[in-house]
Amino acid sequence: MHGEHGVMARVLGDVVPRPGTILVANQRISYRAIKPGTRGRVAVEVNVLNEGKTAWTPEGASLVGPARQSLTGLTLWSLDPIPPGSMGRLVVEVDATESESRGPFTLKLWDEQGHAGVVLEGVTFP
């Protein structure tokens, strides 16, 4: 949707996952919600497959931009464990202006031990 308000989505087919992580990101979509007079919200949705031998429980996330700036105030959804061999859906969202959310960004998701589950480079928002 284009215009002054609404939600826009972009399939992130050109995002590059870093090797050596436990989760495989199968589907990646970014979103931007626009409402006149507000900061707006951006989000990244990632459907992942746990290829590890134990359950992986998300603990935190970061979005780091091209000038090494981090978007702050991130919310990570879902915090449910992802069993081995299973799929899970993770969403990271944050309030951000259009200028603050110009990418590309690196998305990092980690577990309670600090182990990287997913690291995706090249995340952009519509």
Image (tube, rainbow, N blue to C red):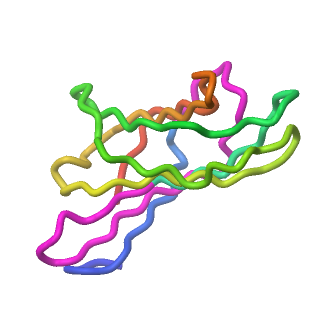
Q: Nearer the viewer, residue 71 or 75?
A: 75
How many marks are shown on the rendered structure?
Answer: 0
Q: Is residue 77 on the magenta stretch?
A: no
Q: At x 70% / y 50%, what residue is drawn?
A: 80
Q: Is residue 82 left or right of residue 32?
A: right
Q: At x 42% / y 43%, what residue is drawn?
A: 123
| Residue 33 position (above or below residue 121) | below
Image quadrant containing the C terminus: bottom left
Q: At x 36% / y 79%, what residue is drawn?
A: 1
Q: Which residues are magenta?
A: 16-43
| Residue 28: x %, y % from top left | 57, 51
Q: Is residue 43 left or right of residue 84?
A: left
Q: Is residue 77 left or right of residue 23?
A: left
| Residue 93: x %, y % from top left | 41, 55
| Residue 87 position (above or below residue 16) | below
Q: Is residue 17 on the magenta stretch?
A: yes
| Residue 50: x %, y % from top left | 78, 38
